[in-house]
Amino acid sequence: MLKTHTCGDLRKSQLGKNVTLAGWVDRRRDHGGLIFIDLRDREGIVQVVFNPERSKACHEIADQLRSEYVVRVAGVVAERPAGTENPRLATGEIEVIADNTEILNPAKTPPFYINEDVDVEERLALKYRYLDLRRARLKANILLRCRVIKFMRDFLDARGFLDIETPILIKSTPEGARDYLVPSRLQPGKFYALPQSPQQLKQLLMVAGMEKYYQIARCFRDEDTRADRQPEFTQLDLEMSFVDKDDVTALIEALLTDMMAALKPDLRIIKPFPRLTYAQAMSRYGSDKPDLRFGLEIGDISDIATRTEFGVFRSVLATGGVVRGIAAPGCGHYTRGQLEELGRLARSLGAEGLVTISLGATPGSLDTLTSEEVKSVAARFLTLDQVKAISARLGAQKGDLLLIVAGKPDKTATVLGDLRKEMGRRLKLADPNLFAFAYIENFPLLHWNAELDRWESEHHPFTAPWEEDIPLLDTAPAQVRGKHYDIVCNGYEIGGGSIRIHKPELQRQLFRLLGYSDAESEALFGHMLEAFEYGAPPHGGIALGIDRLVMLLAGEETIRAVIAFPKNQSAVDLTVNAPAPVTENQLAELHLCVREE
C-alpha cells in the first residue's frame, strides 16, 4: 500500500507516530514560511504542515501543490498548537509534520469547486461526475448507499435467504413498461430484453425449491425519466415460499425498522407501520402513496352540499359527482391574488374549478365565527350553520381556508391529493425528522383501460386475487381485490409486492381476462405455466426501490443524487456520452440497419 493510514484515521492517541498518507489536495495555504495543505481521501481530511527548517526539499514540493493534485506524504503525527484546533474535523486536534512528499499526479483546474458546497449546474456536474463524486455531499450519499445495501444483505443472510443472481438477457414479455431490447448476433432477427424486474425468474426459483431468495437486482425500463425514476435502477428483490401477505410485510417492517435504528438513529419512525386499504388512501389522502407526516385529510361534504343553494354543488351531485375538500390551517387571511393562484393550480391538476371559503383572518373557535368573517363566492348560497358544518367535517377552525372541489370521485380525489401535498409543502407541515412508513393494501386486481377497451393488471399479471373474489373474475372483474401490498414513505412508493398465483389454471384464466388467447399465453408465458404444473408452492414477495429509499435517507430530492453515474432527464449519460452511434460493421453483424426518419 502507498499509505499506512487514511486521512480520517488519525487522532491524539497516535501522537509521535510515523505515518504515510495519500490523497488529494483539498486546500493549500501559504503562511510565508510554513505551508499547510488539507489532504483528503475517502475517509476524511487531515492537515499537513510543510516546514522548510525540517525539510527544505519537502517544502519546495509543497510550493508546487494546487487543488486536486494527488500526493503522497510521509511524516509524524503532532498535536496542533493551542488555539488552532478545528472542531469541525474529526482529525482537528492533530496535524502531520511532513518529512517526505511525492506528487503522484498533478491536476488541471476543476470546472467547479470540489472543496466547497456550492450549487453546480446539473449538466456540468453530470459531465464531470467523477469530480462531483469527490465532493462531500455526493460522497456521503454513495457511502450511505453502500451501508444500506450491506445492512440488507446481512439482515437477510441471517434469516436464511439465498443471494441468487438472475439473467440480465431475458425474454421480452408485457409487464407494464417498455422493454430495452438487445439484438442477438447468433439468432438473427431475435432479441433479448433487459429485465424490468426479476419477477418471473424469482417465481421460478420458488418452483425450484429455493424457498427464500433475494438479490440486489439491476432493473431496466424504457420510460421517461423524472426526479424519482431512471432508465436503470436498483431494487432489493425477494421472494418467499409457503407464506402469506402478513409474513412478507412483517419481514420488511423489521428490516426497515432495524435499518433506521442502525443507520439513522436520529430520525423517528411510526411503529407499527400503519396499514391502509387502497380505498382508504384515495378517500382520505387522494393518493396511493400518501405522506402521513401531516394530517390535512380530505373530507366528503356531499351530504351537506346537497342541502345548500349553491348551483355548482347541486349540479355536480345531480350527475353522480361528489363534493370534497381540505382545510388549510391558518390560511384564512389569503389575499385575492393568492386564492386565484390556488384556483389556477387546481385547474392545472384537472379540476373544473376550486371553491375557496375563508373562515376569517383571526384564529379561534368555530363557535365564534360570524357571517361577516366568511369570504367566498359561494358565501351567499350557504348559511352560517352550513359553513360551520362543512368546516367541522373538514377539521377546520376559525382562521383556516377551505379548499373544495366538485366533480367525479376519482378526479376530486387526485386533485385534492395534489393540493394537499402542495399545501403541506408550502406550510411546512411535514416533520423532516419523521419517516412515516405505511402499507397500502387491497388494491383492485384489475383496471379498465377505456382507450384500449380491455382489462389491465393493476400491478402485474402474476398477482393472486383474494380467494373469495375468484368467482367475480367472470362476473364482476372490477370488484376483484388483489393480494398486493405497497410500502410508502413520506409521499413516495418505495416498494411493492404481492402474493402470487401458483396454480396454472387460475393463471390461464387471468391471462384470458387480460385479452390473451391460450396460444398467446403459451407463446409469452409458457415457461411459467408449465413450471406451475410441476408442483409450485404458494409464494409471494416484494421489491424495495433502493435508489428512492437512499434518496429519502440522504434528504435528497432526486435519485440522481444517490446514483454513482445517473442519466439526465433525456436518459443520456453525459459522462461517457451514451447512447452513441455504432459502426455499420457492428450493425451488419446484428443483421440490423438504421432507418433515418
Image (cartoon, rainbow, N blue to C red):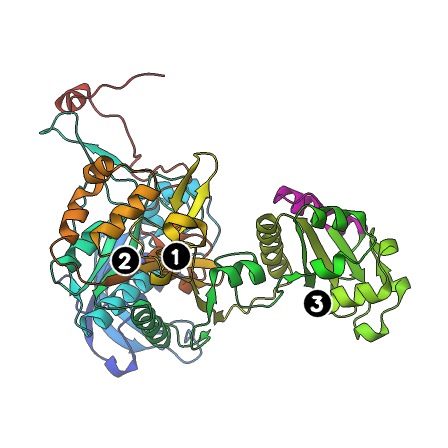
Considering depth in this image, is 268 or 394 the residue closer to the camera?
394
Amino acid type of the residue that numbered disc 2 sits on in the rendered structure: Arg
Element assignment for label 3:
helix
Residue annotated with mark 3: 393
Check if mark 2's residue and mark 3's residue have beta carbons within 8 Å.
Answer: no
Considering depth in this image, is 581 or 253 the residue closer to the camera?
253
Q: Is residue 63 above or below residue 168?
A: below
Residue annotated with mark 1: 548
Q: Is residue 340 above or below residue 247?
A: above
Element assignment for label 1:
helix
Among numbered discs 3 and 1, the one appearing first in the sequence: 3
Among numbered discs 2 and 1, the one appearing first in the sequence: 2
Residue annotated with mark 2: 500
Nearer the camera: disc 2 or disc 1? 2
Amino acid type of the residue that numbered disc 1 sits on in the rendered structure: Arg
Amino acid type of the residue that numbered disc 3 sits on in the rendered structure: Arg
Q: Is residue 588 above or below residue 502?
A: above
Give the spatial CA distance, label 2 vs label 3: 40 Å
